[in-house]
């Protein structure tokens, strides 16, 4: 599926209904060539801008997981400092010392709840705009603290009233492979939206 085909799918009125498509779990993964990371980021914003136009009136919320994670760490107090500052100081004393701490924080209920609150704030206002989609990216930046499979398995209980589209830099064959180098678990309940041209280049 090319990026233009993805836009056409998201523009479809039937697909905009959260109850259509994957009847068991409204999650989709758009898998793309990691070399196109910055291009895809531009396209994500362009799709949002196009979908909100009068012919569709769909207001998309874009979430960069890494940015949200950094903001979350800034809000947590730890001994009079933000948790982010504390972890940065500890990391300077020895690279890798805070990896386990960051993994725990990235899967903490409070972090996921904050994301859910942000999404609810976006979709709840009643106006002429549809709030059908949430785009999530930043998996390359937040690795190794949070994998796509771990995020999806922990966050699925919150997903209701919208469809979530995860943008994943890598390939999906028998398993997911971020950057075509790092194997991930298979978020088996997410529907794969794959660009065949990118998959052929990775073989």
Image (cartoon, grey):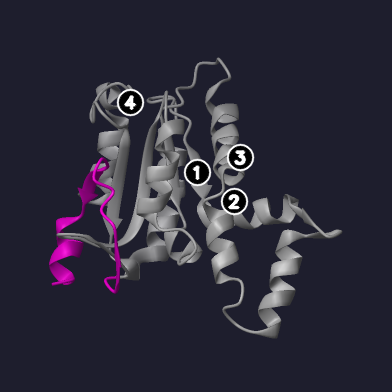
Q: Nearer the viewer, mark 1 or mark 3?
A: 3
Q: Position of residue 130 (x, y in %)?
A: 45, 22
Image position, residue 195 (x, y; %)? 20, 55
Mark 4 surroundings within 10 Å by alpha-carbon count, few (fewer than 14), some (14 through 19), many (20 or more): many
User: Which one is in front, 101 or 39?
Assistant: 101
| Mark 3 to mark 4 CA distance (whole Å) | 25 Å
Mark 3 packing: few (<14 Cα in 10 Å), some, or many (20+)? some
Residue at coordinates 56% horizontally, 21% vertically from top-left?
A: 124
Q: Earlier in the sequence, mark 2 or mark 4?
A: 4
Q: Which residues are magenta?
A: 180-203
Which callout, 3 or 4, points to the residue nearer the camera? 3
Q: CA distance from mark 4 to mark 1?
A: 16 Å
Q: Is residue 36 left or right of residue 142?
A: left
Judging by the rendered image, the residue that carries numbered circle 3 is 114
Q: Residue at x 61, y 42 (%)?
A: 110
User: Which secondary structure, mark 3?
Assistant: helix
Q: Would you name the residue on which mark 2 appears?
A: 68
Q: CA distance from mark 1 to mark 2?
A: 11 Å
Dot placed on the residue nearer the N-terminal end, 1 or 2: 1
Q: Residue at x 55, y 15 (%)?
A: 126
> Could one spot residue 181 in this view of the protein?
yes
Q: Residue at x 43, y 43 (%)?
A: 154
Label 2 with label 3: CB-CB less than 8 Å = yes
Please provide percent x and percent y for residue 111: 59, 46
- Disc number for residue 33: none
* Distance between the alpha carbons at the discs numbered 2 and 4: 25 Å
């Amino acid at each position: 599926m090319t990026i233009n085909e993805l836009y056409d799918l998201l523009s479809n009125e039937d697909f905009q209904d959260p109850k259509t498509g994957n009847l068991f779990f409204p999650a989709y993964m758009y898998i793309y060539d990691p070399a196109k990371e910055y291009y895809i980021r531009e396209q994500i914003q362009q799709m949002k801008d196009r979908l909100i136009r009068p012919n569709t009136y769909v207001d998309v919320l874009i979430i960069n997981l890494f940015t949200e994670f950094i903001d979350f760490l800034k809000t947590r107090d730890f001994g009079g400092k933000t948790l982010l500052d504390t972890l940065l100081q500890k990391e300077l004393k020895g690279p890798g010392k805070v990896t386990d701490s960051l993994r725990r924080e990235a899967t903490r209920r409070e972090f996921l709840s904050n994301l859910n609150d942000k999404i609810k704030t976006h979709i709840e206002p009643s106006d002429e705009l549809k709030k059908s989609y949430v785009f999530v990216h930043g998996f390359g930046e937040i690795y190794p603290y949070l994998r796509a499979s771990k995020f999806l398995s922990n966050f699925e209980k919150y997903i209701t009233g919208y469809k979530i589209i995860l943008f994943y830099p890598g390939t999906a064959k028998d398993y997911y492979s971020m950057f075509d180098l790092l194997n991930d678990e298979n978020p088996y309940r997410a529907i794969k939206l794959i660009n065949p041209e990118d998959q052929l280049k990775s073989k």
